[in-house]
Image (tube, grey):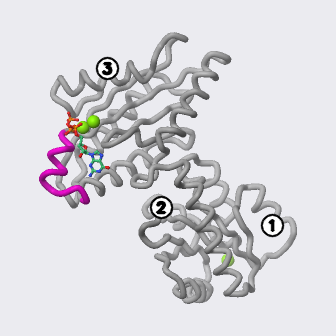
Amino acid sequence: MMKNKPKILVVDDSKNICNVLRRILSKEEYAVTMAEDGEAAIQKVFEWLPDLILLDLMMPKMDGLEVCRRLKSNYKYNFIYVIMLTAKNSAEDEVAGLDIGADDYVAKPFNPTILLARVRRGVRLMKEKLDATFDSLTRLYNRRVFDAFLQQEKAKFRRYNHSFSLILIDLDHFKKVNDTFGHKAGDMVLQEVARFLREDTRDADLPARWGGEEMAILLPETDMKGANILAESLRQRIERHHFPQVGHITASFGVASMRDDESDLVETADRALYRGKQMGRNKVVV
Ligand code: GH3
Ligand code: MG
Ligand code: MG
Ligand code: MG
């Protein structure tokens, strides 16, 4: 995960403070990007997926509390370590920030040495959490966590009869992609497809790395129709996208919904996926 430099997003509406923070952070090996308001911050999170955010509280458009609330209430982004950074140093603000899920809180004016120590600590804590929970290449949930969520959804189904669905995704002829363009290019394709999965799913949905070039999405409270629509739109997005490293690729999708206690969702989706491969790939099969 952090074989490369840890990625830090600095969010502050003051250019001056952004520059000070950049200078402080440049004392250590971090990749740093700036955003000047809350909306820009959310956009940067989607595109760049930082490891840690230094987040100003008071900003125009969308304030820091709202940014933090959005990220922490979203399964796909709530691992990002958020340090709230603010001049508005009242007890209520600190409590509000922590209640919303901020991981740490530093008051302005800050001591650069202490700030750096807190960033180092954040990066360290975050790495432990990430390794246990997420796949390191794609930053999707790993198989172990996904299986736990699947069991949880099954239990909810038995108890409340809440329906849910599963999509299995397998990239087509991916061995050939690797053989032609190299493993590194293949890795970048997997990362980009993972980004599509994050972007096109709702907050409560759970995209995961199933293994190899296979991914899965668990869709709570979603019936077959909804799952099918999402799978089809992802299929089209992948088909249309020009991957800079390899050009065009396609993927096959197997979709299954929980019908009764006996249904084995994984097996059903896997069989559907297999049929999609036999039918010539680049298909969504239910
Ligand atoms: P099909 O359309 O039938 O799915 O063909 P395929 O070539 O995708 O299927 P196969 O299972 O034969 O090969 C999967 C390939 O995915 C082989 C393997 O090298 C590649 N792969 C698996 N994991 C990774 C990874 O983490 N990075 C890269 N670059 N390639 C991977
Ligand atoms: Mg501000
Ligand atoms: Mg495969
Ligand atoms: Mg494949």
Work out how far the residue at label 1 is from the one at label 3, CA to CA, in angstroms. 51 Å
Which mark is first along the chain, 2 or 3?
Answer: 2
The amino acid on which the numbered mark 1 sits, given as a three-letter code, is: Glu
Q: Position of residue 228 (x, y in %)?
A: 38, 27
Residue at the disc numbered 2 = 49
SS category of the residue bearing label 1: helix
Check the image and name the residue furthest to the left: 180
Q: Which residue: 60% across, 89% down?
A: 20
Work out how far the residue at label 3 is from the one at label 2, CA to CA, in angstroms. 33 Å
**First to last magenta residue range:** 173-184
Residue at the disc numbered 1 = 94
Q: Position of residue 235 (x, y in %)?
A: 29, 38
In this picture, residue 249 sits left or right of residue 147: left
The amino acid on which the numbered mark 2 sits, given as a three-letter code, is: Leu
Q: Is residue 181 magenta?
A: yes
Q: Is residue 101 magenta?
A: no
